[in-house]
Image (cartoon, rainbow, N blue to C red):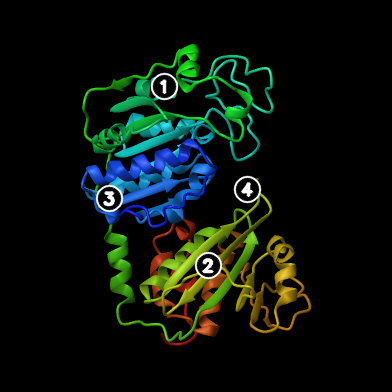
Amino acid sequence: MSGRFIANPVLPYCGGCGHGLVVRNTEKALEQLGLSPLDVILVTDIGCHGLIDSNFTTHTVHGLHGRAVPLASGIAASLPPGRKVVAYIGDGGAAIGLQHLMDAAHRNFDVTVIVHNNMLYGMTGGQPSSSTPCGFRTPTCPNGKEGRGADLCRWVHAAGAMHCRRVLGKGDFSEAIAHAVAVPGFSLLEVVEYCTSYGAKHNPGRSLEDITREAGLALETLTNPSAPPCRLAPRTDTKSLLDLETIARGFTSELDRCVSIVLAGSAGEGVQVAAEMFARAAIAAGLSVTKKGTYPVTVGIGYSVAELMLSPRPILHTAADAPDFVVVTSADGLKYCGAIIARMRSGNLLIDSSLTAPATAASVSQPDFRKPAGPRSAALCACAELLRHHRLFPLAPLRAEAGRSWLTAKLDIERLLADTQSD
């Protein structure tokens, strides 16, 4: 029968996998602490352990491999007291995100990290991890791993964790989980377990007790002197937001549908900053907004593209198959958007007058984005031009937002963003 914390009792693990015991004991521990499911946030990442998200009735967040701890830390730092954040990670994710673990312990975020240490990468074929003990055999180390494995508990304790403990993934260890969750500040519980698909098969006859003893991994509890958990200080720099709200008061958007916009230009020409100003101005005008930035790994050269969605209603997705507006300020942006523009069967293409407009079924206009204030503010000019001609929301909030940006510090904002029509 399902409990308060587990909606589906059928767990997504191989038979005999230690991950299932971690889940059962976590459920029991949370019950022991008298918590409500909505007082608990479970954060997972890539790995077999992360398959459990849909079984829990708590809040759940699923992140990238090795990134569960920073996600959990950010959540914990902004929550009021009384909420509990639990991060599930594997030994592989612990190694990949080791810096996150050390920082979270050092800064004492109020997070409980439960490491599913099955001593290998179970989802990708059984490769050894940094925590694989010396001599432990895996499919890629049939003769046993050379060199000793990492002692996560000792490392994290040295970084300042309030509580670290190592247990075997056998039987009832719910008390260990409950104690770790109850600790104010950062705690880590390492559960040493077997992967039935790769670990047990390649190490027949070796018990978890034998493995930990031979590796010198004591089943111990380590603590540091009590310290207050790290929390975010209340925000005090709200003046700019209040100013924006004051300026935007009385202006409302007449937009009655969801609109998608692609703003494309070159790196270093303020595309992302202009898109963020545009998004904040739209929010001030009462719209829901999403913004996604895309640029090459080199960051400082090549294209820079921002995708925005505006809607008078909550936005439940963050991408559009065909944008309503494509705004291009440079050759780099045009090269990136070539395929997008070719797919357009309607909508509007606004492209700088210095560029050759490609063939498209969209309506094309070619204003000057780059001449009024130079390349660095071309994207901001393009945002203003979009509002002048398509009236998605009033120009006044964008003028107010732009007036506070480093991007426009030396510009005559009133002249640059002067509205040719009355707001």
Q: Secondary structure at mark 4?
A: loop
The residue under label 4 is which amino acid type?
Answer: Gly
- The residue nearer to you, when weighing 183 against 362, is 183
The residue under label 1 is which amino acid type?
Answer: Trp
Q: Residue at x 55, y 84 (%)?
A: 389
Q: Which residue is mark 4?
A: 300
Q: Secondary structure at mark 3?
A: loop
Q: Which residue is mark 2?
A: 318
- The residue nearer to you, when weighing 52 against 346, is 52
Few, some or many residues within 10 Å of mark 1 (<14, 14–19, 20+): some
Q: Which residue is mark 1?
A: 155
For marks 3 and 1, the one nearer the N-term is 3
- Rounded to the nearest whole Å, what is the CA distance between mark 3 and mark 1? 27 Å
Is 408 located above or below residue 61 in the figure? Answer: below
- Rounded to the nearest whole Å, what is the CA distance between mark 4 and mark 2? 25 Å
Q: Secondary structure at mark 2?
A: loop
Image quarter hosting the C terminus:
bottom left
The residue under label 2 is which amino acid type?
Answer: Thr
- Tell me residue 168's x, y (percent): 41, 26
**Residue 303 is drawn in which quadrant?**
bottom right
